[in-house]
Amino acid sequence: MLEVILVDDDDIVLMMQKKMVLRCGIASKPVAFKSATETLNYLNHPQNINNPEKRYLILLDINMPKMNGWEFLDELKNHPLKDNFNVIMVTSSIDRKDRLKAKSYQRVIDYIEKPVTIKHCNTLKKLEPISEFF
């Protein structure tokens, strides 16, 4: 099972991403969070920790208050289910340094500049770590 998690501090972005992943068949019930901290709390919940078979696709914004996307990725490195996470960076940043930094994280499988489009979704479905789910 692949659970899709959307993480962005902007309500409109979350709404648009949710509609897009539903429309493209990436998820039937995506879970959305407005902060990286809320997402970590969810991932650390016993129902998730005690389900090592579950896999996650996380669409993650970089620039968020309190805990940004990079700090979230650093936390994931120590998570007991770290190998079950695949992350797509979804950001408005066009800074080449951000794209290069994303490649340094093992769990990051793609980098998308907002907004998420049908073309992005079709490309995601073909990515090797998650293609088996589509």
Image (cartoon, rainbow, N blue to C red):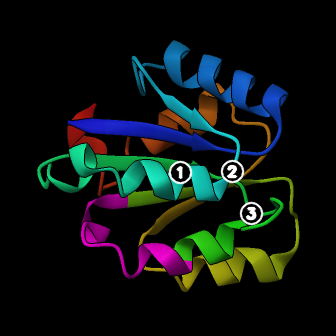
Disc 2 residue type (three-letter): Ser
Quarter of the rendering occupied by the C terminus: top left
Q: Position of residue 91 (x, y in %)?
A: 77, 54
Indicate the quadrant containing the N terminus: top left, top right, bottom left or bottom right. Answer: top left
Dot 2 and dot 1 residues touching (CB under 8 Å): yes
- The image shows residue 4 at horizontal and vertical percentages of 43, 37
Q: Please name whichever residue, 64 or 131, is drawn nearer the observer in this view of the structure.
A: 64
Q: Position of residue 60 (x, y in %)?
A: 62, 54
The residue labelled by disc 2 is 35
Front of the two marks 1 and 3: 1
Question: Is 44 situated left or right of 61 in this image?
Answer: left
The residue tagged 1 is 39
**How far is mark 2 from mark 3, CA to CA?**
11 Å
The residue tagged 3 is: 62
Residue 118 falls in image quadrant: top right
Span of residues in magenta: 74-85
